[in-house]
Every structure is written in C-alpha cells, then in structure tokens.
Image (spheres, helix red, strand yellow):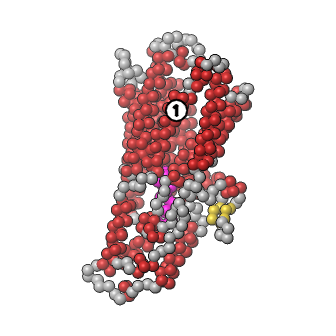
Amino acid sequence: VCVLGYTIVGLALLLIVQAKNVYPQLLLARMFFSIGGAATATMVTAILPSMTAPRTILQQSHPDRATQPASRHVVSPSISSELTITPARLLSQESSFLSKTEGSAPASSPTRLAGFVGLFTGCGALLALGLFLPLPAHFQDVGTEAGQAVADSYYIVGAVSFMIAAICFFGLRNLCGETKKGWRAVLKTSISEVGAPSTRVNTSYWKLLLDSVGLGYQNPLIALGYLGGFVARASSVGISLFIPLFVNAYFISSGLCNDPERDSGDVKAQCRGAYILAAKLTGVSQMIALIFAPVFGYLADRYRHFNTPLLAAAIAGIFGYCGFAVLDSPEYDGIHGSPWIFLFVALLGISQIGAIVCSLGLLGRCILGLEAENESSEIEGFERNGLRDFDQLSSPNVLPTSDSLVPRSPSVVQADVSEENRALLGHKQSGQRSLNHLKGSIAGVYSLAGGAGILLLTKLGGLLFDDLSPSAPFYMLALFNGLLLLFGIASGISERFKANAR
C-alpha cells in the first residue's frame, strides 16, 4: 500500500500539469492525488508496529521457548532445565522478569520511532520549502516560460515520488508480521501454506472498519490515540491556515496594508506586511515542533503512566490557543504588539507535535500489547499456578513432600508442552483475529479521525471566523485540547483501576 500510494502521488503530479480544464480534469487529478496522499499518511501509522521488534510476555518469561520473529526458527524446550529447576531459581527468574517488565523500555519502542517520524516529517516540509518550492523561479531565471517552469517542477517532484516508491518496495520487504501478505491475499479468499490449513481468512472492508472502531470502545487507550489524531490534524490546519488569516484580517481592519481596496489576488502583493508576519509566526511554531519531535518520542516512551507527555501537550495547546486568541495584536512590536506572541505560537507547535508523536506511539504500543494478549492470558495463568506452588515449597514452615520433588519424565513434560500448544492454537482458532490483521484498519481509522478534525475545524471554524470573531477557531482548538486532556485523565484513571483489580 505504501508503494502504491507513492506511485499514485507521482502519477497524479504528472496528470495535474496535463489538465486542460478545471472541471473535470484538474478536479479528478487532484482527487487522485488525495488518494495517494491518504495511503502514504495511513501507512506511517500502520508500519510503526512492524518496524519495532515486539517482545511478547512469552519471550520475556520463557526465552528458551521463544520463537524468533526474524528467522521463525522454533527452539525446542529444554527438558533438563525443567528437571533441575528449584524454588530459589524460580524466585530469581521471577524477580528478573519483573525487573525487565518494569524497567526501561526497549530501544525499538514505537513511541521513540514516532518521535523520529515527526522529526523527519518536519525535515521533509523544510526540504519542500527550501528546494521544491523555488524550482519554478529557478527555471524562469534560466529562460524557461512560467507555465513550462511550473510543469517541469511537477515532473521533478513526481520523479522523486517514484523514486521513494522504489525505495519502499525494497526497503519495506520482509517486515515482522507481513510475510504472508501480498496481492494473493487480496485476490484469494484464504492463504495457506503447502500441506497446512488456512492461516488467514480475508474479511470484508466494513467488518474491519467496525472492528477497528469497536476497539476504541473496548480499549480507552486506543480511543485516546484516535482522539489525539483528531486534535493533531486539526492543530496542523489551525497553525497553517488560521494564523495567516488572523494576521491578514488584523492588518486589513487596522489599515496596515498598502492598498486594502486593491484586489490583485496575490496576498504577498496586497498586504506584504501581513504575509511576512504570518510567515514568521508559523515558521517559529513549526521550528519548535521540529525540535520537540524526538523529545516527545523519548518522554512518551519513558513516562507512560497516565500518558503524561500527551496530557502536557494538551495543556500547552490550551494555554497557547487561548493566549493567542486574547492578544490585542498578532504583532511582536509596535504600540499594540507584544513579544508574548512568540511564546504562544511556540506552545502551539509543542501541542501539535506532542499530539502527533504521542498518539502514533500510543497506537503502536496498543497494537503490540494486544497482539500478545492471547499469549499473556495463558502465561499469566501458568505463572500464577507455578509461583503459588513454589511459594509453598519455599516457605520455611512447610516441608516439601517426596511427590513434589520427583523429576517428571520427558513424556510428561512433552505432554504438558503439547497441552499448552493445543490451548494456544485452540484459542486462536476460535474465531478471534490477531491485531496484526487489524493493524492497517486501525491506522485507517486514525487517519479518518484526523480528517474529521480537519473538516470540522475548516468548515465550522471558518464559519465562526466570518460571522462571530477571528479568534473563534483558536477557541475551538483550545476546546479540542481540553477534551483531549479530560479524556486522557479519565483513561489513565480507568487503566489504573483495571490494574489494581488484576
């Protein structure tokens, strides 16, 4: 899907410059481009869990039975280790297991990777502004006509898109959990290995969509990730769209434009001061967001209780948008200006990148956690029974009986292993699909939530901007961040109660 998305983007860029009219040719080409853009943006969320090496509870507590995800070579259980285990050794393994689970997160955490995704997203925007946007002007300087210069620029960007598609085709092969996916999985109703029963059954689009939406009701953390995507995409539109509109409206109402009655259609020429100030404010906001992207990736991975970094980003958004809206002037100097404007736009950038990085990482962690949910339920029961028995053996007031110290025969151990495997296989064959099957659908719902935030802010916010006040969209964004903060606190309390109940 990622390769197909970049290919569609490249084709759409080539088709846009070939359009002879606005409707329907240019409109259809732009819609075709939107399909490719949606595919590439959605795959960022879907690929994050696959790019990190998941460590299930089974692999952490029983490394000798673990299945390596890269090579898929199953290690046979050690009979000698089962026979020579002692209460002291089990207690030491328990403390080691607890230290691993409660200690620092692995370096391949999806949250940290999401921080670098946000960083390189900002770098891509800077590359577009610094390299691709000036291309038509450079072509005109060497004697190319204006129309052909724009067309040549589109051709270059389309070629870059094709190049990225080729890189993704080779670079994203053999990801963990993606080996059995491909065009055959789309064209056939089931996929099965030679001599093996079917391991994956295709499901309808609507069923996948409903399951992914239903996960938001079942798991508050996934719902929090969806809401974070809603706020993040709305914030990006608020910064890039409504800050320039706010500044331009202020300059026109204050009579600061050179010729406010002239309708040239060019904002730069009509009110150049407003254009420069808006570029400075949005530039500061995006630069702060670029700097804080890896910071939020690290903090969100380290401080997971109550999703503190995400809540901090929401608080920054509340103060930033409210502070920006109550200022008398967007200027940073002059009679009505204030240098506090830079602090508020910096808070806007922090809020935006914090919502993006933390929501992406939160969904990645939830996907990896839910993928191990089936195994963890079995392992938790095994650990509780085993630890209770050995706690009795290690008690100083209880003497071990002869039956408890009799080594089990290899046939008994093999029977136990087979019984455990049958329980796991039976659980998976009971109709429950692994979350790896819903990974792309969850990413799609995340992007759908972000699109809903964009539509709501642009339509309702634009209407309020015209009919009520130019500050209305910023109050809307402050309200969105307030809802994110309240829901984050509620989900954290809910998870804490569930943990105490377990």
Q: Position of residue 92 (x, y in %)?
A: 33, 70
Please name the residue that numbered disc 1 is placed on: 127
Give the farthest residue toward the front.
142
Q: Magenta region: which residues?
A: 362-376
On whether residue 323 falls in the magenta region, the answer is: no
Q: Nearer the viewer, residue 102 or 130?
A: 130
Element type at mark 1: helix
Pick the front one: 402 or 469: 402
In the image, residue 305 lies at what x, y percent?
A: 37, 52
Q: Residue at x 35, y 69 (%)?
A: 94
Residue 446 placement (x, y as % from top left): 54, 46
- The single residue placed furthest to the left in the displayed view is 396
Specify the quadrant that holds the C terminus.
bottom left
Q: How many marks?
A: 1
Q: Is residue 56 above or below residue 424?
A: above
Hey, which quadrant is residue 481 in on the image?
top left
